[in-house]
Image (cartoon, grey):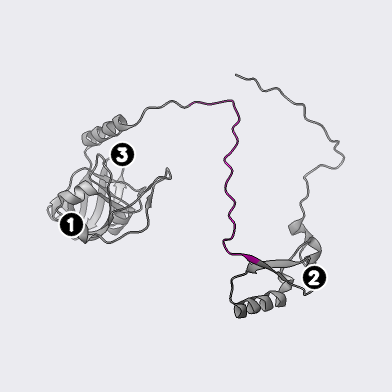
Amino acid sequence: MDINGVDVAQVLVDTANSVNILYLETFQKLRLCHTQLEPLKTPLSGFTGDTVEAEGSIVLPVELGSSEKTVWKKMRFIVVDIKYVHNAIFGRLGINKVGAVISMPHLCMKFHTPGRVGEMKGDQRNARECYTWVVKKMTKGVNVISQEITKEETREKLEPEAKMVEIELHPGDSSRTVRIGANIPEELKMEITRVLQKYTDIFAWSVADMPRIDRSIICHRLAVRDGSRPVRQIEEEVPSQ
């Protein structure tokens, strides 16, 4: 694959990636400068949930194919500072841009070009070497299953930073109130109070406050056959092994 006029080998074609990835080491070998990168505030997230902060993004010319069956497109790459066995990832963004079709059994990708159909073939030997390199870099560990029950970490309950003040929806009735910020300007506070009291019928404190709602929506019926007698389930001992 030709990126920015340089033949770049070991490019992973990955339909699981939504964007094109260019590793920082490859970016530097292409003699590109950090000043050419556009800022990117959104981090990249993988299927494992891990996030990676990007160095930025850049639009580069990409050429696929050989001889007369080539296609040339400008594509955006996300640059990340990660050490990996391949030099770049050709994701769905690039695959869709050239209208490519991938055949995994044949390690082949075909796409339309002005000179009929172009193709790029993968190197099976090179792919195996990359896979072996990744496996060797994996950390070894042992998963331990404990029978002890540990308490889940308690999550901190979020509380409003500003002080709150209670507003009576029905003046004189302190049983039905809502809270708004105490630091709101007085004019805005009066306007919010007026709107809340005007549309007080949208609030419900009990079923009696919802007379027009069909009971089938808020009632649950047990699927029990008529005439069946209740049976208590016998407790079973769970073996410790």
Q: Main secondary structure of the magenta part?
A: loop
Q: Nearer the viewer, mark 2 or mark 1?
A: 2
Residue 194 shows which numbered tag? none
Residue bearing mark 2: 173
Q: Residue at x 37, y 27 (%)?
A: 140
Q: Which residue is mark 1?
A: 33
Q: Is residue 117 left or right of residue 220?
A: left
Percent position of residue 42, x then y: 37, 57
Query: Do residues under tags 3 and 1 come within 8 Å of each other at their CB atoms?
Result: no
Secondary element under disc 1, as helix, strand or loop, is: loop
> Residue 49 is drawn in which quadrant?
top left
Q: Nearer the viewer, residue 141 or 12?
A: 141
Near-viewer residue (109 or 57): 57
Say if the magenta span includes residue 33: no
- Residue that label 3 marks: 105
Outermost left residue: 67
Count of numbered tags: 3
Q: Amino acid at mark 3?
A: Pro
- Callout in the foreground (3, 2): 2
Magenta region:
144-164
Mark 3 vs mark 1, CA separation in Å: 38 Å
Q: Amino acid at mark 2?
A: Asp
